[in-house]
Image: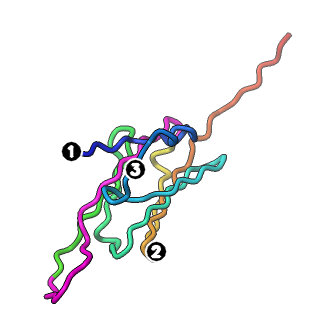
Amino acid sequence: MYQQQKPNLCRPNNFKNVTIDSSLGIPANIKKTEDEIELILALPAFEKSEISIKIVDQDLVVTTTPKEDENSYIRQEFKKKSLKRVFRLPANMDKEQITAKHENGILTIQLKKTVTDQKNIQII
């Protein structure tokens, strides 16, 4: 069975050796700024109620559970299916400051970095 690697979000070069087949998972774009990391996931045709986001240890887990389709099709060329994508969170992410928005088939998850106290030490 296909085992998807968990990309470590804090290392930008970590993605060059990771192959992700979007037909087996949720395609994602990752943006990084000084204050946050933003995950942008493509979930067309999924409703907000069909998407789950959880933190498990140091992993952010996004899963979809499609509702039962009660339509009777003459021909059905695409079908929603259960999907899962796991992202390894860096240690400097504030797990209490994660927000998510689902709009027009795009799920945007914002992960705020923790503020580290820096103290300048005077050399005497």
Tell me: 79 left or right of 89. left
Dot in front, 1 or 2: 1
Percent x, y of residue 116: 62, 35
**Residue under circle 3?**
20
Q: Amino acid at mark 1?
A: Met
Q: Residues within 10 Å of mark 3 (few under 14, many from 20)?
A: some
Which residue: 32% across, 43% down? 56
Q: Position of residue 13 (x, y in %)?
A: 57, 38
Along the viewing direction, whichever of 17 and 90 lies nearer the viewer = 17
Mark 2 in CB contact with mark 3 (< 8 angstroms): no
Part of the protein shown in magenta: 70-92
Residue designated by label 2 = 103
**Residue 116, labelled with which disc?**
none
Q: Earlier in the sequence, mark 1 or mark 3?
A: 1
Is residue 91 highlighted in magenta? yes
The mark that comes first in sequence, 2 or 3, is 3
